[in-house]
Amino acid sequence: MTKKYRILIADDDSLNYLYYKEILDNQIYDIIYVDNGLKAIETLKENPETIDLILMDMKMPDMDGFTATNEIRKFNLTIPIIAQTAYAYREDYEKAINAGCSDYISKPIREDILISKIEKLLKINNS
């Protein structure tokens, strides 16, 4: 049986979630969805052994992705976190990496780039 990788998606836009669900909810990936950073922290704390990667929107209400990532890094230094944002400036990349993100992707999200980043961070070899 193929291992299923569980991805936590934190994004306040449900349309973005539906897009991610379309491309990631399959034989290899299983997804969990939350709509803000605080819920992402709570979900990871409740499921520390079963979440393999976080796709974190940086601009969310209640708690943004920068703050959530900082909080997650206080109790989990190893989980891969991919920052996702509508901004593609070098400063945004650096801010996300400095917050503790493992990688960065700008919107609109291209499926091939997202899958490539996930496979790299999870060390999945699909060749």
Image (spheres, rainbow, N blue to C red):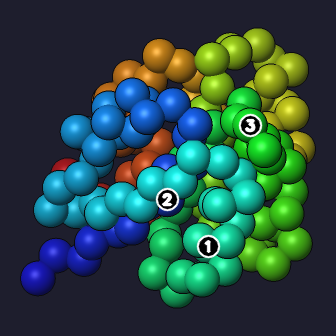
Q: Which mark is residue 61?
A: 3
Q: Quadrant of residue 19?
A: top left
Residue at 30% x, 63% y is 30
Q: Position of residue 27 (x, y in %)?
A: 15, 62
Task: Give the mark nearest the N terminus, 2 or 3.
Answer: 2
Is 17 left or right of 35, judged from the image as shown? left
Mark in the foreground, 2 or 3: 3
Q: Is residue 101 visible?
A: no
Which residue appears farthest toward the front when viewing the image? 62
The one nearer the camera, 103 or 41, is 41
Is 102 left or right of 27, judged from the image as shown? right
Is 45 left or right of 93, judged from the image as shown? left
Q: Position of residue 41 (x, y in %)?
A: 70, 66
Q: Which mark is residue 8?
A: 2
Residues packed near mark 3 inside 10 Å, few (<14), some (14 to 19) or many (20 plus): few
Residue indicated by mark 1: 44
Residue at 27% x, 72% y is 4
Disc 3 marks which amino acid? Pro
Task: Give the mark nearest the N terminus, 1 or 3.
Answer: 1
Disc 1 marks which amino acid? Leu
Disc 1, SS: helix
Q: Position of residue 38 (x, y in %)?
A: 73, 58
Disc 2 marks which amino acid? Leu
Q: Mark 2–mark 3 contact, CB under 8 Å?
A: no
